[in-house]
């Protein structure tokens, strides 16, 4: 680094401008160069000339040498300006500038000019500089702080006109910090984030900024090419594989594939997709010849499967360590070609989640988001090429604006198919795909360093000084590999059965829609032809005339006309033929209907939750409705037992079960009919969800392989460490008792096999009892039986007295010949109290407050708090434990699970009450739910590693919540079930470290539903 100080007379813009003024500003030029020789200033320097109301004497700016934005980003030369003076002197500098030195300009500010009508956060006239960093500099700011918060933008001399307006360019402080990291050589992805946010703020007329950035990305990306060895023939592949499996076999290798012909959002990679290229990076010190340290294999045009299979000795060698980002995807597409991958060393996506499980607000866990963060990447090796670190998105590199019919650019950015990019943009594509493996290895090294520095505090210590990388190595690495195996196994589904229940579901959806329309048509005749799936029409029907909650000057009309499909071929007056559309007028059904919830824009909500508030907890069936109207059908429901429940009976229905619509429609019969009709509307949404999320996707070939088995994606992507599933999301299946179409019945075993379904009983409550060391809960679990009934008995003294008098039974175990208990069971005699106790048991474990419970129970907060107090009365240890977790979140800003995984929280200082409450609930919930995830993971690893189960041929194929599913030969099902129960009840290397037993219920059958 060479530093030169030059004194410039005030009133001058350039070091060469003489002036007789006695006051001066000091310019500091800091030149960074790879060579040690002094720089010769042969080119023009672009000076900052500012007129700003928010600039004070301590303001600072930074100048850059090159005239184009792209070159500036590549340049290692920068010039910093430290100016002392006043706003007036700044104005004099502006007025004295010579214009001839600024002839070269970019188009950037031509676009910004169109955006200059935005309300100014700070007023800054940025004059006569092509490359300027600027922001609203505040009074008393220090040189370093201002420099750290500056932002590079292109400025165009064409805006130096009398009509030029101040520009508002306000960026959040976190993004400013990321921009500083970018120009400090730490990150490139952050620039994309900033420009994307800027474009969103100011509109598409500012696209030239993004275009300049994209051009810069392409130039920097191209510099990778000199380090990449392109493999496009068998002979070259053999030579490289020999080096990989001998000379460099002890290295850690990062691998990545590029895949065509797959929709990753809809299709499983098992038996889908075509590899067009792969890259392998083994570190910057590796030399595959001529200084090349990264391998790029052209599978598309260089030899296809034959060329790819040359790398099988490398990928299948278990002693060669390979790291991936999202190992699941790459593993499946490589195995599609017949490879059996081995040597899995790490998945950087899982490592990142282990390091910080709460990055959703910081970009998430994509390779692009992680490698563009200086916070993530400050622990790895030095960059391979200059300052280049981080994956760059395809949109920035290869995105092109879709052309309109007149040939001009539109707003939509499109990306050509990847195989086309590989051929048409070959050099850039090679750099882009090679950068994936380069970034993955750098990310691995950084995350490994961070995890090593994190202490692993857990009850299963084997040695002192263990760290979280040890945890990853012991648990999450084998667990990640197990999840991929389970995805590969997949599960059979009965598509014929699914087709049958689809017909039934569609018919019931039509019936529910008809019920609602015919009821609504009593009050508004045109409602018979409305679209029941339209929120706008429903809002008009229920809340017409309602004033906007955020803007009282706006309100919904009392009546409104809508254009709808003319499904009934109605011929309007004055028209001789039917038209495709017709107009209907919808008006408010009754004046007493009040909104319980509002949308973000202030209008009454008609979401599922809002409609349930109107309807209450009642059935959609009602005897005044004629279900046979237009719905005769020969659809068989023989295989679907009890679909839709039994016919509605008004006997025993408490009026309190009805929702707010009951009172709005005057109560009695009309009020009841309103609630039942709105429940039918809720049912439409529920059925539609089941059809679109399960019944249809499970029949699709997108998620099934060539053998007909479906392969859902299993992911560790929750903040607590719980697994989630995609394609389809099996976690969202309705509870067993609410599974009206018996969807689980569609999941079947292969011929000759059975499914074992094993489920933990009240796992999270048992973990809470252990963590809080709650004697009352521990005793209740030790006693066994119905835990929720015991909770109700301990909460309400009159229930305990009834049990003591033997008026009711806590539990009943029938003997041969007995068909009913001698006296009522507690769960029947005190059903309401037990229901509240059950809800409390789970709600308190999740940190729910009396306010939330009052809303769920539709009672006052006072009544809900009194009920909660009853629960805590003999469980004070739980109350104490929860208070400790809240304090821990407030002071340490993190909590831990049973096995020592950490979830971090932001500081509560200055947080709103709502935000603080959210953190406190999460601090209570995470140790419970996260520990349940730890238990389930350990149980799965025990099952997977059990030699006898493997010998018998049983394999894990699915895990949902606290439930695992295995498939294997029916002949050994009984023995396998006993082994599974043993593994789950003693999941920690054959032991149970909890203070309470782990109850496991297991069955085997031909389908999932029957095994529950």
Image (cartoon, helix red, strand yellow):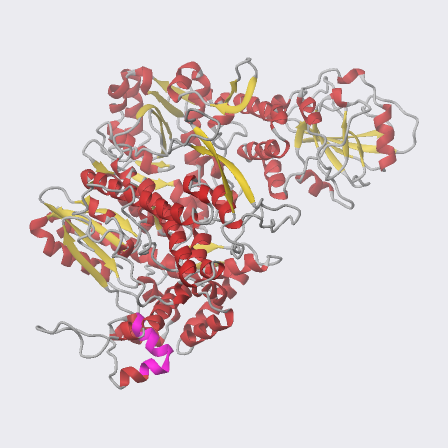
**Residue 447 appears in which quarter of the rendering?**
top left
- Residue 463 x %, y %: 34, 59
Report whether 130 appears left or right of 756. Answer: right
Q: Quadrant of residue 810?
A: bottom left
- Magenta extent: 788-800
> Seen from this angle, which residue lies furthest left?
971
Q: Of helix, strand and loop, which mostly describes the magenta segment?
A: helix
Q: How many marks?
A: 0
**In which quadrant of the rendered image does the C terminus lie?**
bottom left
Q: Where does the image place residue 742, in percent across and percent down from the top left? A: 23, 49
Say which quarter of the image contains residue 279.
top left
Residue 987, given in percent of the width and then of the height, sits at 25, 59
Q: Is residue 794 magenta?
A: yes
627 or 851: nearer the viewer: 627
In the image, residue 339 sits, relative to residue 290, either above or below, namely below
Q: Nearer the viewer, residue 265 or 448?
A: 265
Q: Residue at x 26, y 71 (%)?
A: 786
Residue 876 in view of the camera = no
Q: Is residue 977 visible?
A: yes
> Does residue 262 show up magenta in the picture?
no
Above or below: residue 428 compared with residue 556? above
Q: Nearer the viewer, residue 576 or 110?
A: 576
Q: Is residue 535 left or right of residue 303?
A: right
User: Residue 187 location, x and y as percent?
Assistant: 54, 34
**Is residue 144 placed above or below 1011 in the rendered structure?**
above
Instruction: Give above or below for 850 relative to 918.
Output: below
Where does the N terminus fall, quadrant-wise? top right
**Which residue is pictured at 74% across the width and 40% down the height?**
137
């Amino acid at each position: 680094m060479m530093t030169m100080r030059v004194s410039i007379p005030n009133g001058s813009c350039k070091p060469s401008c003489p002036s007789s003024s006695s006051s001066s500003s000091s310019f500091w030029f800091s030149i960074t160069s790879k060579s040690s020789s002094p720089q010769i200033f042969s080119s023009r320097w672009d000076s900052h000339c500012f007129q700003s109301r928010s600039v004070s004497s301590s303001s600072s700016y930074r100048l850059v040498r090159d005239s184009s934005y792209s070159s500036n980003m590549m340049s290692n030369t920068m010039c910093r300006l430290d100016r002392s003076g006043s706003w007036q002197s700044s104005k004099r500098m502006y007025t004295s500038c010579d214009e001839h030195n600024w002839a070269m300009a970019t188009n950037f500010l031509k676009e910004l000019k169109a955006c200059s009508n935005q309300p100014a956060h700070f007023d800054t006239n940025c004059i006569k500089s092509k490359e300027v960093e600027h922001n609203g500099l505040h009074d008393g700011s220090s040189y370093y702080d201002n420099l750290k918060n500056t932002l590079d933008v292109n400025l165009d001399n064409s805006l130096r006109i009398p009509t030029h307006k101040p520009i508002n360019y306000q960026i959040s402080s976190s993004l400013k910090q990321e921009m500083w990291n970018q120009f400090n050589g730490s990150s490139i992805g952050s620039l994309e984030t900033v420009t994307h946010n800027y474009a969103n703020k100011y509109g598409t007329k500012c696209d030239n900024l993004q275009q300049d950035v994209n051009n810069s990305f392409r130039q920097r990306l191209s510099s990778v090419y000199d380090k990449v060895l392109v493999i496009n023939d068998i002979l070259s592949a053999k030579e490289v594989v020999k080096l990989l499996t001998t000379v460099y076999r002890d290295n850690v290798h990062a691998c990545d594939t590029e895949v065509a012909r797959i929709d990753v959002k809809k299709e499983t990679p098992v038996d889908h997709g075509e590899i067009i290229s792969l890259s392998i990076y083994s570190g910057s010190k590796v030399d595959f010849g001529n200084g090349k340290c990264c391998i790029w294999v052209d599978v598309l045009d260089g030899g296809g499967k034959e060329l790819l299979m040359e790398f099988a000795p490398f990928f299948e060698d278990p002693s060669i360590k390979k790291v991936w980002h999202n190992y699941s995807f790459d593993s499946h597409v490589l195995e599609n070609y017949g490879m059996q991958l081995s040597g899995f060393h790490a998945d950087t996506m899982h490592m990142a989640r282990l390091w910080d499980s709460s990055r959703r607000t910081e970009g998430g866990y994509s390779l692009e988001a992680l490698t563009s963060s200086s916070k993530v990447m400050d622990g790895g090796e030095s960059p391979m090429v200059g300052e280049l670190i981080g994956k760059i998105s395809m949109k920035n590199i290869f995105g092109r604006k879709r052309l309109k019919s007149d040939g001009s650019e539109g707003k939509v950015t499109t990306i050509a198919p990847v195989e086309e990019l590989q051929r048409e943009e070959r050099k850039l594509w090679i750099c882009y795909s090679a950068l994936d493996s380069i970034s993955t290895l750098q990310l691995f090294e950084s995350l490994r360093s961070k995890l090593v520095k994190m202490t692993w505090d857990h009850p299963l210590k084997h040695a002192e000084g263990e760290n979280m990388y040890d945890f990853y190595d012991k648990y999450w690495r084998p667990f990640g590999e197990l999840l991929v195996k389970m995805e590969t196994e997949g599960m059979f589904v009965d598509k014929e059965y699914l087709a049958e229940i689809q017909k039934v579901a569609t018919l019931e959806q039509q019936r529910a829609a008809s019920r609602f329309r015919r009821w609504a048509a009593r009050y508004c005749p045109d409602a018979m032809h409305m679209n029941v799936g339209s929120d706008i029409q429903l809002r008009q029907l229920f809340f017409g005339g309602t004033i906007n909650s955020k803007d009282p000057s706006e309100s919904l009309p009392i009546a409104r006309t809508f254009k709808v499909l003319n499904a009934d071929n109605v011929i309007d007056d004055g028209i001789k033929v039917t038209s495709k559309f017709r107009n209907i007028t919808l008006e408010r059904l009754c004046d007493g209907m009040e909104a319980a919830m509002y949308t973000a824009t202030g209008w009454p909500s008609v979401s599922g939750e809002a409609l349930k508030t109107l309807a209450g907890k009642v059935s959609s069936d009602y005897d005044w409705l004629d279900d046979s109207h237009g719905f005769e059908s020969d659809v068989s429901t023989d295989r679907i037992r009890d679909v839709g429940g039994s016919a509605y009976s008004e006997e025993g229905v408490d009026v309190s079960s009805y929702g707010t619509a009951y009172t709005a429609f005057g109560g009695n019969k009309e009020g009841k009919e309103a609630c039942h009709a709105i429940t039918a509307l809720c049912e439409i949404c529920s059925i539609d969800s089941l059809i679109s999320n399960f019944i249809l996707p499970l029949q699709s070939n997108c998620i099934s392989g060539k053998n007909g088995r479906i392969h859902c994606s299993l992911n560790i992507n929750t903040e607590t460490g719980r697994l989630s599933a995609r394609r389809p999301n099996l976690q969202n299946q309705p509870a067993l008792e609410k599974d009206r179409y018996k969807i689980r019945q569609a999941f079947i075993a292969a011929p000759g096999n059975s499914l074992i379904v094993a489920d933990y009983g009240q796992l999270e409550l048992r973990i809470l009892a252990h963590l809080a060391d709650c004697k009352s809960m521990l005793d209740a679990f030790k006693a066994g039986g119905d835990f929720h009934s015991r909770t109700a008995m301990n909460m309400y003294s009159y229930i305990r007295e009834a049990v003591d008098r033997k008026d009711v039974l806590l539990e009943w175990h029938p003997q041969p010949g007995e068909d009913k208990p001698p006296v009522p069971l507690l769960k029947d005699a005190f059903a309401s109290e037990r229901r509240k106790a059950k809800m409390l048991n789970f709600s308190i474990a999740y940190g729910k407050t009396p306010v939330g419970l009052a809303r769920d129970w539709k009672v006052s907060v006072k009544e809900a708090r009194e009920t909660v107090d009853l629960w805590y009365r003999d469980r004070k240890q739980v109350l104490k434990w929860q208070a400790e977790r809240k304090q821990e979140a407030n002071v340490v800003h993190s909590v831990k699970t049973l096995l020592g995984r950490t979830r971090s929280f932001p500081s509560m200082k200055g947080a709103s009450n709502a935000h603080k409450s959210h953190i406190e609930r999460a601090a209570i919930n995470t140790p419970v739910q996260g520990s349940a995830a730890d238990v389930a993971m350990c149980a799965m690893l025990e099952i997977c590693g059990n030699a006898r189960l493997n010998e018998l041929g049983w394999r894990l194929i699915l895990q949902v919540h606290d439930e695992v599913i295995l498939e294997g030969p029916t002949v050994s099902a009984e023995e396998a079930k006993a082994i599974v129960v043993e593994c789950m009840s003693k999941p920690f290397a054959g032991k149970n470290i909890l203070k309470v037993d782990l109850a496991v219920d297991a069955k085997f059958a031909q389908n999932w539903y029957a095994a529950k």
